[in-house]
Image (tube, rainbow, N blue to C red):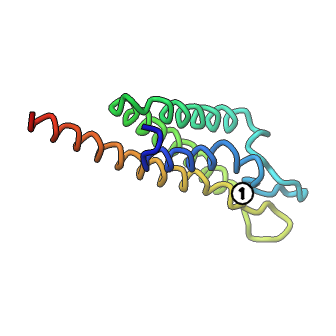
């Protein structure tokens, strides 16, 4: 059902991947301009796919196994995205004020991963509860 706790976690993950990254820059470039994810096609595709998977997981609440698998795929996708962000941040040197600075937006996939793990944990708990009730019949 929609009112389960994993739906709340998935909605929060949707807010992190789908809405907050429009407002929080990933990092600041050398010329002082903020770099948003929309300026890179790879980041846009990966974040769009992550947001789509989150919405698909919310909608498929009747099929807990599919919801669990979609959550795992979304976690893997966010780990890849986080790896790309870390790779990019290691290429940006932040030793002097004249060069780029890393932003907090790079760490939003970590928040999304934590929320997706909590949602998968709650989905697994529901699935175990349903299986235990089926055993009693």
Is 111 displayed left or right of 103 in the figure? Answer: left
The kind of secondary structure element at disc 1 is loop
Q: Residue at x 36, y 48 (%)?
A: 122
Is 42 displayed left or right of 25 in the figure? Answer: left
Q: Residue at x 64, y 33 (%)?
A: 48
Q: Residue 83 placed where, x, y %?
A: 55, 48
Q: Residue at x 50, y 36 (%)?
A: 58
Label 1: how many residues lie within 10 Å, few (<14), some (14-19) or many (20+)? some
Q: Nearer the viewer, residue 135 or 123?
A: 135
Is 108 displayed left or right of 25 in the figure? Answer: left
Q: Residue 124 placed where, x, y %?
A: 30, 44
Instruction: Locate the N terminus and report the quarter of the image it occupies.
Output: top left
Total numbered labels: 1
Q: Residue 92 placed where, x, y %?
A: 72, 57
Residue furthest bottom as drawn: 96
Q: Quadrant of residue 84?
A: top right
Taking 84 as reference, is 69 above or below it? above
Is 103 displayed left or right of 110 in the figure? Answer: right
Residue furthest left as drawn: 136
Q: Residue at x 68, y 54 (%)?
A: 91
Q: Which residue is mark 1?
A: 92
Q: Quadrant of residue 131?
A: top left
Instruction: Locate the C terminus and report the quarter of the image it occupies.
Output: top left
């Amino acid at each position: 059902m929609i009112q389960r706790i994993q739906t709340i976690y998935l909605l929060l993950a949707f807010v992190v991947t789908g809405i907050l990254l429009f407002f929080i820059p990933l990092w600041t470039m050398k010329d002082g301009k903020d770099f948003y994810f929309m300026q890179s096609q790879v980041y846009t595709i990966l974040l769009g796919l992550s947001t789509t998977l989150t919405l698909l997981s919310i909608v498929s609440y009747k099929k807990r196994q599919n919801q669990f698998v979609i959550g795992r795929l979304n976690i893997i996708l966010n780990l890849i995205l986080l790896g790309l962000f870390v790779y990019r941040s290691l290429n940006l040197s932040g030793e002097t004020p004249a060069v780029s600075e890393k932003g907090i937006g790079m760490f939003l996939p970590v928040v999304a991963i934590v929320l997706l793990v909590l949602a998968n944990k709650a989905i697994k708990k529901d699935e175990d509860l349903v299986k235990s009730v089926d055993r009693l019949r």
